[in-house]
Image (cartoon, helix red, strand yellow):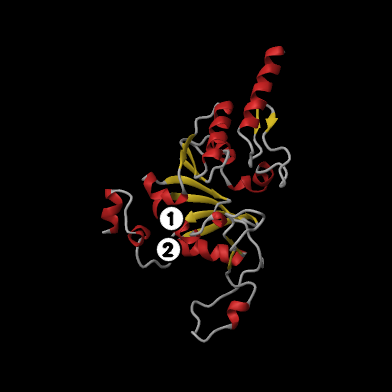
Amino acid sequence: MVQQTKDRTVIAQEIAALGPWFHNMRIGGIETAPGHFLGDYPAVKWKAFRHVVPEDLEGRSVLDIGCNAGFYAQEMKRRNAGRVLGIDSDPHYLRQAKFAAEQAGVDIEYRLMSVYDAARLRERFDLVIFMGVLYHLRHPLLALDLLYEYVVGDQMLFQCMQRGSDSVASLKGDYDFREWEIFDRPDYPKLFFVEHRFADDPTNWFIPNRAGVEAMLRSAGFVIEANPEREVYLLRRGERPYLDEPTLRILGGSADAGNKARLD
């Protein structure tokens, strides 16, 4: 009993040293963010859409982009996923994720990478998790293009904060140059730009309405298979409706020789 108490004390000290936590994980029976402003987050959100992910992932590969402390990565391992890779651009979150995975005894690989580095992975994944990242990016459509072109092999679990109208406009395929009124409709696809801060976060750059999210996803080549929650979508890689040239050519580089051949 004394040894168990000591172990719990040590774990509590390590959790505190790695704080602050955004994911409320349970490590050794201790919650990492018990006072989270969203409640038991992200577990409370996961409960609302976990049914769209197969209970048994049968060894499939998973990439968790913007993995934070690794809540979703661990959930995928619990569902029998094979290789699970989590990437994040913040080393603070990766330290938390590695610690949480070690304590849980799960084999998850973590790398310090940005979504813009997607082509460097040189690998397509059966399931890509892209939750709560898009609105933190200065180049959101670029990120979706890179994911479509280089890492999404089959499905993507996607979430993005939304504001504005929840309605989606029924639009024509084209409009005359003199058209003005359509842009004033609240259900027209919109992407609100945050010049300074939103929710006291300097990385909240673009916040779309629902029509805007869905239009961007379709434009990048994704098919919406399910929308179990207002902000959450299960997507499948489909056919891109229009693209004048691959993204890495636009950026002036290529991920590897194979990609170079593809771009040529």
What is the quadrant of the N terminus in the image?
top right
Residue marked by disc 1: 148
Question: Of the residues shown, which amino acid type is indicated by label 2?
Answer: Arg
Residue sticking out furthest to the top: 2
Q: Quadrant of residue 186?
A: bottom right
Instruction: Measure how far apart labels 1 and 2 are at the Cα level.
Output: 9 Å
**Location of residue 223 in the rendering, given as x and y in whole percent from the top left corner:** 50, 59
| Residue 131 visible in the shown view | yes
Q: Quadrant of residue 148?
A: bottom left
Between 60 and 96, the residue placed more toward the observer is 96
Residue 240, which numbered label?
2
The answer to the question of whether label 1 and label 2 lie on touching residues, with beta carbons closer than 8 A, is yes
Residue 84, which numbered label?
none
Residue sticking out furthest to the front: 196
Q: Secondary structure at mark 2?
A: loop
**Location of residue 254 in the rendering, given as x and y in whole percent from the top left corner:** 32, 53
User: In the figure, is residue 4 to the left or right of 244?
Assistant: right
